[in-house]
Amino acid sequence: MRRKLVLFLMLCMCFLAGCGSGGENQSGNNSEPKKEEKEVEITLPADFFEEGMTEEKLSSIKEENGFKDAILNEDGSVTYVMTESVHKEYMKDITQSIQDSCDELVNESETIVSIECNDDFTNFKVTTSSESVTLEESFSCFGFYMYSGMYHMFNGTEVDNVHVDFVNVDSGEVIHSIDSKDLTEE
């Protein structure tokens, strides 16, 4: 599970370092004027970046990814401005990465049979051969919370709760449910 979290974080860092594929320029010999696309602004917190982030580094990231702008804010956060089509490609890549991580978890687990999730990664259904939730399965929730948080951060949306149901494969019954909002309640 730890390896999956590290791999997902590496994907996100590739986004920040300019390794993503979403910024490829679409060039062609079409002489028709392009319709002006709406812009999307995404602000990522300072914790996301190495110390010493400079305007020069951001300029390089901006150019490599096809962003319209990359702004270093006073608090150390960075605001990326991009077209809707570039943003859509990044969201598509992030979605695929989350789904791949879930598939890998299933393939490496001795008890998890399948993982299903909704489109915005706020609801997960983990089908398991266990009759009660194992330690591995419990820890998988932290990965789901992180996946959802990353998805929503890059989507520029808030997430109030991530819900996880553990379902026994034989009985089809929910054997345990966990909500991320419960972690912050006293």
Image (tube, rainbow, N blue to C red):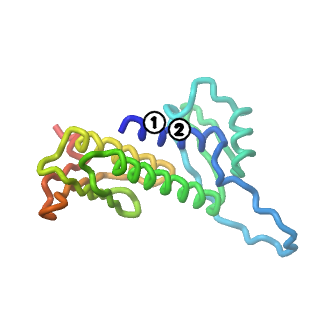
State the separation of the CA atoms marked 1 and 2: 6 Å
**Looking at the picture, does residue 55 appear above or below residue 170?**
above
Determine whether, in the image, residue 72 is placed left or right of residue 160.
right
Rendered image quadrant of residue 169: bottom left
User: In the image, what residue type sits under mark 1?
Assistant: Val
Work out whether residue 110 or residue 102 is closer to the camera in this orientation and state it.
110
Work out whether residue 77 or residue 171 is closer to the camera in this orientation and state it.
171
Do callouts 1 and 2 mark residues in contact (Cβ within 8 Å)?
yes
What kind of element bears circle 1?
helix
Residue 64, horizontal then vertical, whole percent: 73, 45
Give the residue displayed 36% in from the left and 52% down from the top: 159
Report the number of numbered marks. 2
Work out whether residue 18 or residue 96 is closer to the camera in this orientation and state it.
96
Residue 166, horizontal then vertical, whole percent: 20, 54
Give the residue displayed 24% in from the left and 57% down from the top: 127
Q: Which mark is residue 10?
A: 2
Specify few, some or many for label 1: CA neighbours under 10 Å numbering under 14, 14-19, or 20 or more: few
Determine whether, in the image, residue 63 is placed left or right of residue 157.
right
Residue at the top extreme? 52
Residue 70, horizontal then vertical, whole percent: 66, 43
Q: Quadrant of the C terminus?
A: top left
Q: Which mark is residue 128?
A: none
Q: Which residue is mark 1?
A: 6
Q: Quadrant of the N terminus?
A: top left
Work out whether residue 110 or residue 33 is closer to the camera in this orientation and state it.
110
Give the residue displayed 19% in from the left and 53% down from the top: 129
Residue 37, horizontal then vertical, whole percent: 68, 66
What kind of element bears circle 2?
helix
Residue at the bottom extreme? 32
Specify few, some or many for label 2: CA neighbours under 10 Å numbering under 14, 14-19, or 20 or more: few
User: In the image, what residue type sits under mark 2?
Assistant: Met
